[in-house]
Amino acid sequence: MGYEEQYSKKLVSAEKAAETVQDGDWVDYGWAVGTPVKVDQAIAKRLPSLKDVNFRGGILIWEPEIFKIEEPEKHMTWNSWHMSGIERKTIAKGFGFYAPLRYSELPKYYEESEDPLNVAVFQVTPMDEHGWFNFGPSCSHLEAICRKAEKIIVEVNKNMPMCFGGTVNGVHIDDVDMIVEGDNPPIGEMGAGGEPTEVDIKVANLIVPRIPNGACLQLGIGSMPNTIGSFIAKSDLHDLGVHTEMYVDAFVDIAKEGKINGSKKNHGTGKQVYAFGAGTKKLYDYLNNNPECLASSVGYVNDIDSVSSLDNFISINNAVDVDLYGQVNAESAGTKQISGAGGQLDFVLGAYRSKGGKSFICCSSTFTQKDGTVKSRIRPTLAEGSIVTDTRTNIHYLVTEYGCENLKGTTMWERAEKIIGLAHPDFRDELIAAAEKMNIWKRSNKR
Protein backbone atom coordinates (compact mmCIF):
# COMPACT_ATOMS: atom_id res chain seq x y z
CA MET A 1 0.00 0.00 0.00
CA GLY A 2 1.41 3.42 -0.95
CA TYR A 3 1.86 6.23 1.55
CA GLU A 4 -0.94 8.34 0.07
CA GLU A 5 -3.36 5.43 0.29
CA GLN A 6 -2.34 4.79 3.90
CA TYR A 7 -2.84 8.49 4.59
CA SER A 8 -6.39 8.41 3.21
CA LYS A 9 -7.29 5.33 5.26
CA LYS A 10 -5.94 6.80 8.48
CA LEU A 11 -7.39 10.30 8.00
CA VAL A 12 -10.17 10.93 10.54
CA SER A 13 -12.03 13.83 12.08
CA ALA A 14 -10.84 15.33 15.36
CA GLU A 15 -14.03 14.03 16.96
CA LYS A 16 -13.26 10.48 15.84
CA ALA A 17 -9.73 10.78 17.21
CA ALA A 18 -11.06 12.03 20.55
CA GLU A 19 -13.17 8.88 20.91
CA THR A 20 -9.98 6.90 21.54
CA VAL A 21 -9.63 8.55 24.96
CA GLN A 22 -11.31 6.48 27.68
CA ASP A 23 -11.76 6.61 31.47
CA GLY A 24 -8.46 6.23 33.30
CA ASP A 25 -6.31 6.65 30.20
CA TRP A 26 -2.87 8.24 30.12
CA VAL A 27 -2.74 10.69 27.23
CA ASP A 28 0.46 12.39 26.09
CA TYR A 29 0.04 15.87 24.61
CA GLY A 30 3.51 16.16 23.12
CA TRP A 31 5.72 19.10 24.06
CA ALA A 32 5.74 22.90 23.77
CA VAL A 33 4.62 24.05 20.30
CA GLY A 34 3.73 20.46 19.40
CA THR A 35 0.75 20.48 21.79
CA PRO A 36 -2.42 19.56 19.84
CA VAL A 37 -5.04 22.15 18.99
CA LYS A 38 -7.95 20.72 17.01
CA VAL A 39 -7.87 17.31 18.72
CA ASP A 40 -7.55 19.08 22.08
CA GLN A 41 -10.78 20.95 21.30
CA ALA A 42 -12.55 17.69 20.49
CA ILE A 43 -11.23 15.93 23.60
CA ALA A 44 -12.39 18.90 25.72
CA LYS A 45 -15.94 18.41 24.45
CA ARG A 46 -15.80 14.73 25.34
CA LEU A 47 -13.99 15.12 28.67
CA PRO A 48 -17.01 16.04 30.88
CA SER A 49 -18.37 12.53 30.23
CA LEU A 50 -15.09 10.90 31.33
CA LYS A 51 -13.26 10.45 34.62
CA ASP A 52 -9.67 9.98 35.78
CA VAL A 53 -8.05 10.89 32.47
CA ASN A 54 -4.35 11.66 32.98
CA PHE A 55 -2.79 14.09 30.53
CA ARG A 56 0.94 14.63 30.29
CA GLY A 57 3.04 17.32 28.58
CA GLY A 58 4.99 20.47 29.37
CA ILE A 59 6.22 23.95 28.39
CA LEU A 60 2.67 24.92 27.42
CA ILE A 61 2.63 28.12 25.39
CA TRP A 62 -1.15 28.45 25.20
CA GLU A 63 -3.96 27.19 27.42
CA PRO A 64 -5.43 23.92 26.14
CA GLU A 65 -9.21 23.65 25.88
CA ILE A 66 -9.20 20.70 28.30
CA PHE A 67 -8.23 23.19 31.03
CA LYS A 68 -11.34 25.27 30.38
CA ILE A 69 -14.05 22.69 31.04
CA GLU A 70 -16.25 23.06 34.10
CA GLU A 71 -14.66 21.50 37.21
CA PRO A 72 -11.72 19.90 35.38
CA GLU A 73 -10.44 18.37 38.63
CA LYS A 74 -13.40 15.95 38.54
CA HIS A 75 -12.41 14.59 35.17
CA MET A 76 -8.66 14.91 34.66
CA THR A 77 -5.18 15.62 35.93
CA TRP A 78 -2.47 17.54 34.11
CA ASN A 79 0.97 16.06 34.76
CA SER A 80 3.79 18.35 33.68
CA TRP A 81 7.44 17.53 33.03
CA HIS A 82 8.26 21.25 33.11
CA MET A 83 5.78 23.94 34.05
CA SER A 84 5.11 27.16 32.21
CA GLY A 85 3.10 30.01 33.71
CA ILE A 86 -0.07 28.51 32.24
CA GLU A 87 0.57 25.22 33.99
CA ARG A 88 1.38 26.80 37.35
CA LYS A 89 -2.24 27.94 37.58
CA THR A 90 -3.47 24.36 37.33
CA ILE A 91 -1.84 23.53 40.67
CA ALA A 92 -3.93 26.13 42.50
CA LYS A 93 -7.04 24.87 40.69
CA GLY A 94 -6.42 21.34 41.92
CA PHE A 95 -5.84 19.44 38.71
CA GLY A 96 -2.20 20.16 37.86
CA PHE A 97 0.90 18.42 39.20
CA TYR A 98 4.62 18.54 38.50
CA ALA A 99 6.58 15.36 37.78
CA PRO A 100 10.14 15.73 39.17
CA LEU A 101 12.67 14.27 36.78
CA ARG A 102 15.90 15.41 35.16
CA TYR A 103 14.91 16.30 31.63
CA SER A 104 17.69 14.15 30.16
CA GLU A 105 16.04 11.08 31.71
CA LEU A 106 12.71 11.45 29.88
CA PRO A 107 13.42 9.16 26.91
CA LYS A 108 14.68 6.42 29.24
CA TYR A 109 11.62 6.85 31.44
CA TYR A 110 9.32 6.17 28.49
CA GLU A 111 11.48 3.27 27.32
CA GLU A 112 11.67 1.48 30.68
CA SER A 113 8.66 2.58 32.72
CA GLU A 114 5.87 0.12 33.37
CA ASP A 115 3.39 3.01 33.51
CA PRO A 116 0.87 2.91 30.66
CA LEU A 117 0.71 5.30 27.72
CA ASN A 118 -2.62 4.75 26.00
CA VAL A 119 -2.74 7.66 23.56
CA ALA A 120 -0.19 10.11 22.19
CA VAL A 121 -1.42 13.14 20.24
CA PHE A 122 0.66 16.06 18.98
CA GLN A 123 1.11 18.45 16.07
CA VAL A 124 3.41 17.63 13.16
CA THR A 125 4.34 18.87 9.69
CA PRO A 126 2.54 17.50 6.61
CA MET A 127 3.78 14.07 5.53
CA ASP A 128 6.74 14.08 3.14
CA GLU A 129 7.17 11.88 0.07
CA HIS A 130 8.86 9.19 2.19
CA GLY A 131 5.94 8.86 4.62
CA TRP A 132 7.46 10.88 7.48
CA PHE A 133 5.73 13.45 9.69
CA ASN A 134 8.29 15.82 11.20
CA PHE A 135 8.01 16.80 14.89
CA GLY A 136 9.00 20.39 14.09
CA PRO A 137 11.03 22.09 16.84
CA SER A 138 9.73 19.71 19.54
CA CYS A 139 11.97 16.68 19.07
CA SER A 140 12.81 16.32 22.78
CA HIS A 141 11.45 12.92 23.87
CA LEU A 142 8.73 12.45 21.22
CA GLU A 143 10.40 9.47 19.53
CA ALA A 144 10.38 7.63 22.88
CA ILE A 145 6.72 8.56 23.32
CA CYS A 146 5.92 7.10 19.90
CA ARG A 147 7.67 3.83 20.74
CA LYS A 148 5.69 3.59 23.99
CA ALA A 149 2.20 4.70 22.95
CA GLU A 150 -0.55 2.19 22.21
CA LYS A 151 -2.14 4.67 19.77
CA ILE A 152 -0.50 7.57 17.95
CA ILE A 153 -2.58 10.45 16.63
CA VAL A 154 -0.86 13.16 14.60
CA GLU A 155 -2.43 16.55 13.96
CA VAL A 156 -1.08 18.05 10.75
CA ASN A 157 -0.24 21.76 10.74
CA LYS A 158 1.08 23.26 7.49
CA ASN A 159 2.69 26.07 9.50
CA MET A 160 4.88 23.73 11.56
CA PRO A 161 8.55 24.32 10.66
CA MET A 162 10.38 21.33 9.21
CA CYS A 163 13.37 20.76 11.48
CA PHE A 164 16.26 18.52 10.47
CA GLY A 165 17.37 15.84 12.86
CA GLY A 166 17.08 12.40 11.31
CA THR A 167 14.68 9.66 12.37
CA VAL A 168 14.53 10.89 15.98
CA ASN A 169 12.68 13.99 14.79
CA GLY A 170 9.74 12.33 13.10
CA VAL A 171 7.24 9.49 13.04
CA HIS A 172 6.51 7.32 10.01
CA ILE A 173 2.99 6.77 8.70
CA ASP A 174 3.43 3.03 9.27
CA ASP A 175 3.47 3.74 13.01
CA VAL A 176 0.63 6.28 13.04
CA ASP A 177 -2.89 5.13 13.91
CA MET A 178 -4.87 8.27 13.08
CA ILE A 179 -4.25 11.47 11.15
CA VAL A 180 -6.18 14.67 11.77
CA GLU A 181 -5.79 17.63 9.46
CA GLY A 182 -5.77 20.61 11.79
CA ASP A 183 -6.83 24.17 11.12
CA ASN A 184 -3.21 25.25 10.55
CA PRO A 185 -2.98 27.86 13.32
CA PRO A 186 0.22 29.92 13.60
CA ILE A 187 2.87 28.23 15.72
CA GLY A 188 2.57 29.40 19.32
CA GLU A 189 5.05 32.11 20.19
CA MET A 190 6.95 32.52 23.42
CA GLY A 191 8.15 36.05 24.05
CA ALA A 192 11.88 36.68 24.02
CA GLY A 193 11.55 39.03 26.99
CA GLY A 194 11.23 42.78 27.17
CA GLU A 195 13.96 45.36 27.02
CA PRO A 196 17.04 44.40 29.06
CA THR A 197 17.08 45.78 32.58
CA GLU A 198 20.09 47.52 34.08
CA VAL A 199 20.76 44.33 36.04
CA ASP A 200 20.59 42.17 32.90
CA ILE A 201 23.14 44.42 31.21
CA LYS A 202 25.52 44.36 34.19
CA VAL A 203 25.36 40.56 34.37
CA ALA A 204 25.95 40.25 30.62
CA ASN A 205 29.00 42.50 30.89
CA LEU A 206 30.41 40.24 33.61
CA ILE A 207 29.91 36.97 31.70
CA VAL A 208 30.65 37.69 28.04
CA PRO A 209 34.35 38.56 28.62
CA ARG A 210 34.75 35.13 30.25
CA ILE A 211 33.61 33.31 27.09
CA PRO A 212 36.49 32.20 24.83
CA ASN A 213 36.47 32.04 21.05
CA GLY A 214 35.36 28.60 19.88
CA ALA A 215 33.14 28.08 22.93
CA CYS A 216 30.02 25.89 22.74
CA LEU A 217 26.96 27.64 24.15
CA GLN A 218 23.90 26.64 26.16
CA LEU A 219 21.43 29.36 27.13
CA GLY A 220 18.50 28.98 29.51
CA ILE A 221 15.15 30.69 29.21
CA GLY A 222 14.42 34.25 30.36
CA SER A 223 15.40 37.85 29.82
CA MET A 224 18.83 37.52 31.42
CA PRO A 225 20.14 34.69 29.16
CA ASN A 226 18.57 36.44 26.16
CA THR A 227 20.38 39.66 27.08
CA ILE A 228 23.64 37.76 27.38
CA GLY A 229 22.94 36.27 23.96
CA SER A 230 22.40 39.72 22.46
CA PHE A 231 25.72 40.87 23.94
CA ILE A 232 27.46 37.82 22.46
CA ALA A 233 25.96 38.74 19.07
CA LYS A 234 27.54 42.21 19.33
CA SER A 235 30.87 40.96 20.66
CA ASP A 236 34.10 40.05 18.83
CA LEU A 237 33.66 36.35 19.62
CA HIS A 238 33.88 33.90 16.72
CA ASP A 239 33.79 30.19 15.84
CA LEU A 240 31.07 29.57 18.43
CA GLY A 241 29.05 26.36 18.65
CA VAL A 242 25.59 25.57 19.98
CA HIS A 243 24.55 22.52 22.01
CA THR A 244 21.51 23.53 24.03
CA GLU A 245 18.39 22.11 25.60
CA MET A 246 16.19 24.94 24.34
CA TYR A 247 16.83 26.89 21.15
CA VAL A 248 15.87 30.51 21.85
CA ASP A 249 15.73 33.72 19.83
CA ALA A 250 19.16 34.83 21.04
CA PHE A 251 20.83 32.06 19.05
CA VAL A 252 19.24 33.38 15.85
CA ASP A 253 20.74 36.81 16.53
CA ILE A 254 24.18 35.34 17.28
CA ALA A 255 24.08 33.18 14.15
CA LYS A 256 22.98 36.01 11.87
CA GLU A 257 25.90 38.09 13.12
CA GLY A 258 28.22 35.37 11.83
CA LYS A 259 29.44 34.26 15.25
CA ILE A 260 28.34 30.62 14.98
CA ASN A 261 29.91 28.01 12.71
CA GLY A 262 30.41 25.06 15.08
CA SER A 263 33.87 24.43 13.67
CA LYS A 264 35.46 23.78 17.07
CA LYS A 265 32.87 21.29 18.33
CA ASN A 266 34.16 17.83 19.23
CA HIS A 267 30.93 16.27 17.95
CA GLY A 268 28.03 17.68 16.00
CA THR A 269 30.66 19.72 14.18
CA GLY A 270 29.14 22.51 12.14
CA LYS A 271 25.67 21.90 13.58
CA GLN A 272 23.59 23.83 16.10
CA VAL A 273 22.21 21.02 18.24
CA TYR A 274 19.07 21.42 20.38
CA ALA A 275 16.32 19.35 22.03
CA PHE A 276 13.44 21.74 21.35
CA GLY A 277 12.86 25.29 20.27
CA ALA A 278 10.34 27.90 21.37
CA GLY A 279 10.31 31.62 20.72
CA THR A 280 9.05 34.14 18.21
CA LYS A 281 8.25 33.72 14.52
CA LYS A 282 11.83 34.78 13.80
CA LEU A 283 13.05 31.61 15.48
CA TYR A 284 10.62 29.29 13.66
CA ASP A 285 11.47 30.83 10.31
CA TYR A 286 15.18 30.35 11.02
CA LEU A 287 14.82 26.69 12.05
CA ASN A 288 12.56 25.80 9.11
CA ASN A 289 14.49 23.68 6.56
CA ASN A 290 17.79 24.89 8.01
CA PRO A 291 20.38 22.09 7.64
CA GLU A 292 22.72 23.86 10.07
CA CYS A 293 20.28 23.24 12.94
CA LEU A 294 19.90 19.71 14.28
CA ALA A 295 17.00 18.73 16.55
CA SER A 296 17.82 15.67 18.62
CA SER A 297 16.64 13.59 21.55
CA VAL A 298 17.03 15.26 24.92
CA GLY A 299 18.59 12.00 26.06
CA TYR A 300 21.57 12.90 23.88
CA VAL A 301 21.53 16.68 24.07
CA ASN A 302 21.36 16.94 27.87
CA ASP A 303 23.42 13.88 28.65
CA ILE A 304 26.31 14.87 30.92
CA ASP A 305 28.76 12.82 28.85
CA SER A 306 27.63 14.57 25.64
CA VAL A 307 28.02 17.98 27.25
CA SER A 308 31.34 17.30 28.94
CA SER A 309 32.92 15.95 25.75
CA LEU A 310 32.51 19.37 24.11
CA ASP A 311 35.51 21.58 24.88
CA ASN A 312 34.97 25.08 26.29
CA PHE A 313 31.33 24.39 27.05
CA ILE A 314 29.59 27.48 28.44
CA SER A 315 26.31 26.97 30.33
CA ILE A 316 24.25 30.03 31.32
CA ASN A 317 21.14 29.58 33.47
CA ASN A 318 18.87 31.45 35.89
CA ALA A 319 18.13 30.99 39.58
CA VAL A 320 15.21 31.95 41.81
CA ASP A 321 17.43 32.21 44.87
CA VAL A 322 20.72 30.97 46.29
CA ASP A 323 21.81 30.41 49.89
CA LEU A 324 25.14 30.91 51.64
CA TYR A 325 25.99 27.24 51.20
CA GLY A 326 25.78 27.70 47.43
CA GLN A 327 22.58 25.72 47.04
CA VAL A 328 20.66 26.88 43.97
CA ASN A 329 16.88 26.89 43.71
CA ALA A 330 15.81 27.41 40.10
CA GLU A 331 12.29 25.98 40.16
CA SER A 332 10.14 27.00 43.12
CA ALA A 333 9.22 29.81 45.49
CA GLY A 334 9.10 27.89 48.74
CA THR A 335 6.56 25.13 48.10
CA LYS A 336 5.07 26.94 45.09
CA GLN A 337 6.22 25.23 41.92
CA ILE A 338 7.42 27.70 39.26
CA SER A 339 8.96 25.60 36.51
CA GLY A 340 10.91 22.38 36.93
CA ALA A 341 14.34 20.80 37.20
CA GLY A 342 14.74 20.75 33.43
CA GLY A 343 18.32 20.14 32.36
CA GLN A 344 20.03 22.72 34.52
CA LEU A 345 21.90 20.22 36.71
CA ASP A 346 22.98 18.21 33.66
CA PHE A 347 24.54 21.30 32.11
CA VAL A 348 26.06 22.52 35.38
CA LEU A 349 27.80 19.16 35.83
CA GLY A 350 28.68 18.70 32.17
CA ALA A 351 30.09 22.20 31.73
CA TYR A 352 32.45 21.80 34.67
CA ARG A 353 33.67 18.43 33.36
CA SER A 354 34.25 19.99 29.92
CA LYS A 355 37.84 20.94 29.07
CA GLY A 356 37.84 24.71 29.61
CA GLY A 357 34.11 24.65 30.41
CA LYS A 358 32.27 27.04 32.71
CA SER A 359 28.80 27.01 34.25
CA PHE A 360 27.23 30.36 35.18
CA ILE A 361 24.21 30.65 37.47
CA CYS A 362 22.75 34.16 37.15
CA CYS A 363 20.21 36.13 39.11
CA SER A 364 19.43 39.65 40.19
CA SER A 365 20.47 40.31 43.78
CA THR A 366 16.92 41.31 44.77
CA PHE A 367 13.30 41.01 43.72
CA THR A 368 10.24 43.09 44.55
CA GLN A 369 7.10 41.49 45.98
CA LYS A 370 3.59 42.50 44.96
CA ASP A 371 3.31 44.77 48.00
CA GLY A 372 6.48 46.64 46.99
CA THR A 373 8.75 44.99 49.56
CA VAL A 374 12.27 44.35 48.27
CA LYS A 375 13.73 40.95 49.15
CA SER A 376 17.17 39.45 48.67
CA ARG A 377 17.60 36.50 46.32
CA ILE A 378 20.65 35.56 48.37
CA ARG A 379 19.48 34.03 51.63
CA PRO A 380 21.17 32.44 54.66
CA THR A 381 19.37 29.20 53.81
CA LEU A 382 16.77 28.46 51.17
CA ALA A 383 13.18 29.10 52.20
CA GLU A 384 11.35 26.17 53.76
CA GLY A 385 10.06 23.94 50.98
CA SER A 386 12.32 25.42 48.29
CA ILE A 387 13.79 22.91 45.88
CA VAL A 388 17.54 22.42 45.58
CA THR A 389 18.02 22.28 41.81
CA ASP A 390 21.84 22.40 41.98
CA THR A 391 23.51 21.18 45.15
CA ARG A 392 26.27 23.17 46.83
CA THR A 393 28.90 20.75 45.50
CA ASN A 394 27.92 21.43 41.89
CA ILE A 395 27.81 25.21 41.59
CA HIS A 396 30.63 26.80 39.59
CA TYR A 397 30.23 30.54 38.85
CA LEU A 398 27.55 32.62 40.57
CA VAL A 399 26.73 35.99 39.02
CA THR A 400 24.64 38.99 40.10
CA GLU A 401 24.93 42.64 39.12
CA TYR A 402 27.51 42.96 41.92
CA GLY A 403 30.03 40.51 40.54
CA CYS A 404 30.95 37.07 39.28
CA GLU A 405 32.52 34.57 41.67
CA ASN A 406 33.94 31.09 41.13
CA LEU A 407 32.69 29.03 44.09
CA LYS A 408 34.18 25.71 43.06
CA GLY A 409 36.55 24.32 45.72
CA THR A 410 35.93 27.09 48.23
CA THR A 411 35.64 26.34 51.94
CA MET A 412 32.47 27.48 53.66
CA TRP A 413 33.96 30.70 55.04
CA GLU A 414 35.41 31.62 51.62
CA ARG A 415 32.14 30.75 49.95
CA ALA A 416 30.03 32.74 52.42
CA GLU A 417 32.25 35.78 51.91
CA LYS A 418 32.07 35.55 48.12
CA ILE A 419 28.31 35.00 48.04
CA ILE A 420 27.62 37.85 50.48
CA GLY A 421 29.72 40.08 48.23
CA LEU A 422 27.27 39.34 45.42
CA ALA A 423 24.26 40.36 47.53
CA HIS A 424 22.71 43.82 47.48
CA PRO A 425 24.58 46.04 50.00
CA ASP A 426 21.37 46.64 51.96
CA PHE A 427 21.27 42.95 52.93
CA ARG A 428 24.93 42.18 53.55
CA ASP A 429 25.04 42.97 57.28
CA GLU A 430 22.15 40.63 58.07
CA LEU A 431 23.70 37.93 55.89
CA ILE A 432 26.99 38.31 57.77
CA ALA A 433 25.13 38.01 61.08
CA ALA A 434 23.40 34.87 59.83
CA ALA A 435 26.71 33.42 58.59
CA GLU A 436 28.23 33.98 62.04
CA LYS A 437 25.36 32.07 63.68
CA MET A 438 25.81 29.29 61.11
CA ASN A 439 29.56 29.13 61.95
CA ILE A 440 30.60 29.82 58.36
CA TRP A 441 32.10 33.28 58.96
CA LYS A 442 35.68 34.05 60.05
CA ARG A 443 36.43 37.03 62.24
CA SER A 444 39.12 38.04 59.75
CA ASN A 445 36.60 38.24 56.92
CA LYS A 446 35.84 41.58 55.31
CA ARG A 447 32.98 43.43 56.92
Image (tube, rainbow, N blue to C red):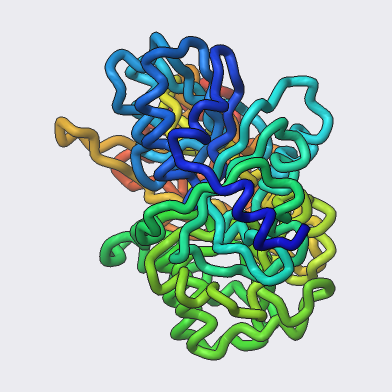
In the rendered image, residue 254, in percent from the top left (x then y), is placed at: 51, 80
Residue nearer the viewer, 162 or 298: 162
Residue at (76% x, 69% y) in the render: 356
Q: Is residue 113 visible?
A: yes
Residue at (67% x, 34% y) in the render: 151
Residue at (58% x, 77% y) in the render: 289
- Left/right placement of residue 384 relative to residue 364 reads right
Outermost residue on the left side: it is: 371
In the rendered image, residue 285, in percent from the top left (x then y), is placed at: 46, 75
Rendered view: 156 above or below 146: below
Residue nearer the viewer, 420 or 15: 15
Residue nearer the viewer, 241 or 68: 68
Rendered view: 90 above or below 355: above
In the rendered image, residue 418, in percent from the top left (x then y), is placed at: 54, 48
Rendered view: 418 above or below 195: above
Placement of the C terminus among the 4 image quadrants = top left
